[in-house]
Image (tube, rainbow, N blue to C red):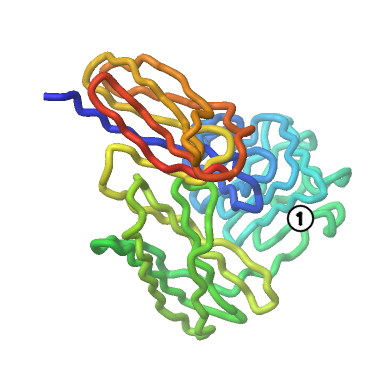
Amino acid sequence: MKPLLILLIALGAAATASAGSVITAVVNNGNWGTNSTWSLNRQPGNGDTVLIPANKTVLFNTDENLNGALIRIYGVLNMNGGKKLNLDNASVIRVYPGGTIMGTGSSDQIRIGSTHVFDGNEPDITGPMFADQTTGSGFAPMQVMPVTFVNFYVTKDKDQVKIYWSTATESNNDHFELERSFEGSAYYHIANIAATNNPSGSSYSYNDDISSIRTAETIFYRLKIVDRDQSYDYSNVVSIRMPLQTNLVVKGNPFTDRIRIQLIATQKDNVQMKLYDESGRTVAEKTITVLPGSNQIDWNNLQLLASGNYVIELRTSKERFSQKVVKK
C-alpha cells in the first residue's frame, strides 16, 4: 500500500492594515510581549488591528513602538512595570464600553506621536473613549457604533456556509459587509447586506456558496458594520472547519512572499518541490527530506516572482501532487 501523504499548504501573505490584519488576545493575563498571548502567535506589529476582547486582560510588559496601529479594547490593557507604548500619529486607541486601560505609576505611559495621552498615575480610562492625534493630551468620549449584537455564528450545509447574526439594537446603521478569510488575518469582501435599522434589533442570514472552495481547512468570517456617516467597526470573528477534500490544501491564496507547507508522511522520504509559471517554466525548486509524522516546511523568498498564476508540484518516491496558486 502506498504511503498516505496529507499536505496542508499555507501561503503566508504579508498582511497589511488595508487587508485587515487582526491580532486578538487569546490568553487571559497574558503578556503583550509573549507570542502565545496572541491569535497569530506573534506580537502585534505595524499596521495591525489589535483586539483585546471582553473578559481578557493583557499585561503590557515591554516597551513598544508601533505605526499605523488600531488598538481596540473591550477587556483590560494593564500598563505595568514602567513600560511605554509609543504610537505614531496614524494610530488610534479605542476603549469600548466595559473596556479599561489602567496603570501603576507615572512611568507606565502611552504616547501618540509626541503627545502623552496616558500614564499610570492618572485615573483609569474606561470606555467608551478614544485617543488619536486629534484628542490632545488624553482620551475623548467616543461615539459607540450603532449596533448591539446578540449572536453571530455559522453552520455548514453541503456546499454552503450559512451565516447568522442578530442584533438587540440598531441606530443609524446603514449596512453590513460580510468578509471572508482562509488564514484569519487577510479578509476579503463577499457581500453587502442592508441594515433594517430597527431600534429593537433584527435577525439576518446569508448563504455563502463554497462549492468552488476545495482547499481550505478553516474559513473565517467577520462583519464590517457601516454607519450612515460611513464610519465603521468590526464584529468578532467566527470560523468553521472544513472537511479535507484533497491531499493538497491551499490557504491564503493569493500569496506574496512565501508558501508554508505541513506534510504528514508515514515514512522517511525525499520530496522534490517545483514552482512553474503559466508557460511551464520552472521558476523555483528545492528538495527536502521528510520524516514520518508531521513536517513543517517554509518555502521563503518568493517575493521577487512576477504577479500571476503558478503551479506548485510536489513529488515523492510514490506520488505526485500539484496545485494552482496565485502570486499577488
Identify the residue shown where x is 27% and y is 42%.
246
| 125 and 272: which is toward the camera | 272
Identify the residue shown where x is 65% and y is 49%.
17
Q: Quadrant of residue 227?
A: bottom right
Q: Quick check: can you spot residue 27?
A: no
- Name the image quarter holding the C terminus: top right
User: Circle 1 sits in a helix, a strand or a loop, which is it?
Assistant: strand
| 230 and 270: which is toward the camera | 270
- Left or right of 158? Residue 43 is right
| 104 and 36: which is toward the camera | 36
Crowd around label 1: few <14 · some 14–19 · many ≥20 (10 Å): many
- Name the image quarter holding the N terminus: top left
Rendering coords of residue 207 (x, y %): 36, 70
Rendering coords of residue 194 (x, y %): 51, 80
Q: Is residue 296 above or below residue 153?
A: above
Identify the residue shown where x is 37% and y is 62%.
153
Q: Is residue 328 above or below residue 281?
A: below
| 322 and 75: which is toward the camera | 322
Q: Quick check: can you spot residue 299?
A: yes
Which amino acid type is shown beneath numbered disc 1? Ala
Q: Residue furthest front?
A: 279
- Left or right of 218? Residue 55 is right
Rendering coords of residue 63 (x, y %): 72, 30
Q: Quadrant of residue 83?
A: top right
Residue linked to disc 1: 131
Q: Is residue 140 above or below residue 256?
A: below
Q: Quadrant of residue 97?
A: bottom right
